[in-house]
Amino acid sequence: MKLSNVIIVIAFIFIIVGGYLILTNPINNEDVSGDLQKIPLKTQDFNLFEIDIPKGSNFTVKNEASGMKYYQNTGKYANNISGIIINKNLTESLIGDNSVSVSNTTTEQIYSSQFKNGTIYKLVSNQDDVDFIIIGNDLNLLKEVSDTIKVKDSNL
């Protein structure tokens, strides 16, 4: 056999073996793109409302005042979604001076604040005359969680 024929046979073998390996070991597209895996959610009942939150998170009341309640995440994914504030007519004062408006629609406002550790987002969603401020560094997760809010009692 000529050397060129040997090279063609070897290349053909590599192509067949490579195809076999690709078919038997599918590539996870999330790993290739560098995207994080989707965070699993579960429905949580907060008495006044229900919302889907990350599994393993632990929201407890950190602050409470007339017309406002702040739940802080002390469990898993605490950076991704660090807190939920429900309030009536207090949103402007709760957003803070160092926050910049990123997006503003009739149903949702998004603010960001820059810190040395990164960006923190505050997503405001109005539901049944109650404002929800969802706080964290994962804007996609905040939007996903916001879409699951169900108000049970709007009396704060």
Image (cartoon, rainbow, N blue to C red):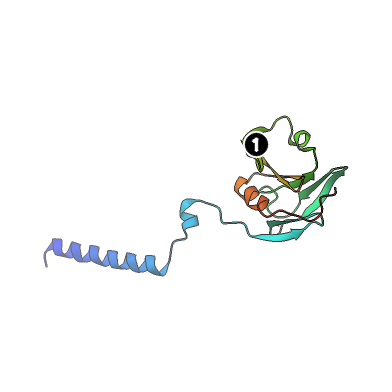
Quarter of the image for residue 91 reads top right
From the top left corner, tell me how far across and down residue 39 is, in percent. 62, 57
Q: Is residue 103 left or right of residue 19?
A: right
> Within 10 Å of the Cα at label 1, are there few (<14), some (14-19), or many (20+) other Cα atoms?
many
Q: Residue at x 70, y 55 (%)?
A: 76
**Residue lying at the far top of the rendered structure:** 97
Q: Is residue 89 left or right of residue 99?
A: right
From the top left corner, tell me how far across and down residue 128 is, in percent. 75, 48
**Residue lying at the far right of the rendered structure:** 66
Quarter of the image for residue 47 reads bottom right
Say which of 57 and 140 sits in front.
140
Secondary structure category for the residue under label 1: strand
Q: Residue at x 65, y 52 (%)?
A: 147
Say which of 75 and 40 sits in front.
40
From the top left corner, tell me how far across and down residue 86 is, in percent. 78, 46
From the top left corner, tell me how far across and down residue 33 is, in percent. 47, 52
Q: Residue at x 83, y 50 (%)?
A: 61
> In the rendered image, which residue does mark 1 sit on?
112
Q: Pick the quarter of the image with the N terminus.
A: bottom left
Say which of 95 and 83 sits in front.
95
Image height of 130 relative to 15, above or below: above
As shown in the figure, which amino acid type bears the numbered disc 1? Ser
Quarter of the image for residue 20 reads bottom left
Badge count:
1
